[in-house]
Amino acid sequence: MQYHYTTKMRKFDYIIVGSGLAGLYAAYKASAKGSVAVITKSFLRESNSFNAQGGIAAVTSRDDNPEIHKSDTLIAGRGLCEDRSVEILVNEGPDRIAEIIAEGMEFDTVNGVLALGLEGGHHKRRILHAGGDATGRWITEFAIKKVLERDNISIFENTLLLDLLVRDGECYGVRCWSENEALQSAGEKGSEVLLYANHVFLTSGGASAVYARTTNPQTTIGDGLAIAYKSGCRILDMEFIQFHPSGLYLKDSQRAFLISEAVRGERAHLLDKNGKRFMVPIHELAELAPRDIVARSIYKQMQKDGMPYITLSLKHLDKEMILQRFPGIYAQCKEFGYDLTQEIPVAPAAHYSVGGVMSNNEGRTDVKRLYVCGEVAATGIMGANRLASNSLIECLVFASRAVEDSVKVGAVKECPHFDYEYMKDEANAELYARLKEQVSEIMNSHAGIIRSEEGLKEGLKKIEALSQSIKQRQAQRQVSGREYYLEASRRLLCVARLIMSPALLRQESRGGHYREDFPCADEAYALHSVQRKGEEITTAPVNSNFFNF
């Protein structure tokens, strides 16, 4: 194999892009097969996985079974789940849980038995949690510990994915911009770096931070989605954005500290401005209805009340239970001046990208040697609306399957040469920051919880105008190659289009997509939306051979 190395070129067996649970677990599993590089755009502990409060869903009790878990997942998915993918999740999930427990992961227990919580859409208590309300942090720390124990895993923080090294439909590595000293040439403070690998795992998370009000880290803006799209991957169901019903409302701030669904699982109540429960007549599960229903109901109640929030009440619950079960949330609320044991103001916030890069049940994409896992992937499990706490278990199940599949694919036989392409002009930094704020406001206003044809068209028109301004900026500054901030701007605008374009075409309401001009579900739209660069948006039937590739 011939590689054209410089001091900034490195070769690994596996490159993992992202440091959430999917990426860390994939890295740990892959380290048994060869050398691994983990790159993350910020820090190892900056991810949605790390911040997850609720828990991880898997069948572990005798009064539960995979069929019930599958049924709950299908109901929440509103007719767009792939049966085979869901079956894999619910049947292999318990094995992955048993595996990590055997390796040292400690979940909360009561009298030596796993303590199981209940969340929206589940008909059985099957949510494992750790540290009360710190499951994401505990399980991510467990994965980080496992990764750090392996000498053949290299971790590169402050390293941003710019592009995939793709030639003729095959991925040979990644192109990134790194501020990490371990990847720098002498005297450089940041530069483009090429990393080669036999297999690339894209585990870069979702895109909910393209919205102004979100529970996600501000870095979660869909870079991986846009780059995979550019590289030829199909993108599925991006119109479905899950808004978490309960983000703590903070006056004069777009911050939305997450109040876990597990709080409502312990029988907290949602109250209108008159102190009355409004979810009881809306759904048989009341506050524990699927997230899309609860979020939309809260939004409508806020409009009806003329208030920017509704009230989450726990004052009827046992105070000691709250303090023991939700110590982290209690402490954070106290810091903001609220008492979780009484009543707090909450409002919906963008939380989870239901769609993503299309993958089969082994994590493969349309690009050979490129795998996707976690929130960035569209496996067919989430359908039109993610069932609470299915995301972390999906990370474990499909990261494991993808690593095993990579062994069958084998190593690269010959690698083509790739040139450096990027430069960085700090004069464009302010432009990017301003554009990011503009895009987030457009998404909130035109592609939020409740949408319309008029609003979506106006939003797309504004995105196109911003795209033209980026082209003009490049022409004015006579940038001949790829400039860091301008390309980041293009990726951001691409993600906005990937969400709004299928939302405009889907003339119905289903799951995380609600059109006020088409408020009912329409079986004619019981189809996946499919987007591919250079092609018109198409659709694909559910439970066909579409995912068999």
Image (cartoon, grey):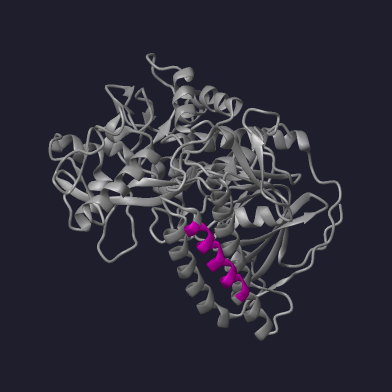
Return the x and y of residue 363 as percentages of the image width and height.
65, 38
Whether residue 211 is visible to the viewer of this picture, yes or no, is: no
Q: Residue at x 48, y 25 (%)?
A: 98
Q: Main secondary structure of the magenta part?
A: helix
Q: Nearer the viewer, residue 22 or 221?
A: 221
Outermost residue, top direction?
A: 62
Q: How many discs appear? A: 0
Q: Nearer the viewer, residue 397 or 227?
A: 227
Above or below, 39 relative to 465: above
Compared across the picture, whether 132 is left or right of 186 comes to left
Magenta stretch?
Answer: 454-468
Q: Residue at x 57, y 79 (%)?
A: 428
Return the x and y of residue 159 as percentages of the image width and height.
58, 62
Return the x and y of residue 423 as percentages of the image width and height.
67, 75
Q: Residue at x 52, y 41 (%)?
A: 146
Compared across the picture, whether 438 is left or right of 334 comes to right
Magenta stretch: residue 384 in it? Answer: no
Q: Quadrant of the C terminus?
A: top right
Name the quadrant containing residue 134.
top left
Return the x and y of residue 416 as percentages of the image width and height.
85, 57
Whether residue 205 is visible to the viewer of this picture, yes or no, is: yes
Compared across the picture, whether 491 is left or right of 51 comes to right
Q: Nearer the viewer, residue 193 or 249?
A: 249
Name the quadrant containing residue 155.
bottom right
Compared across the picture, whether 296 is left or right of 33 comes to left
Above or below, 474 relative to 389: below
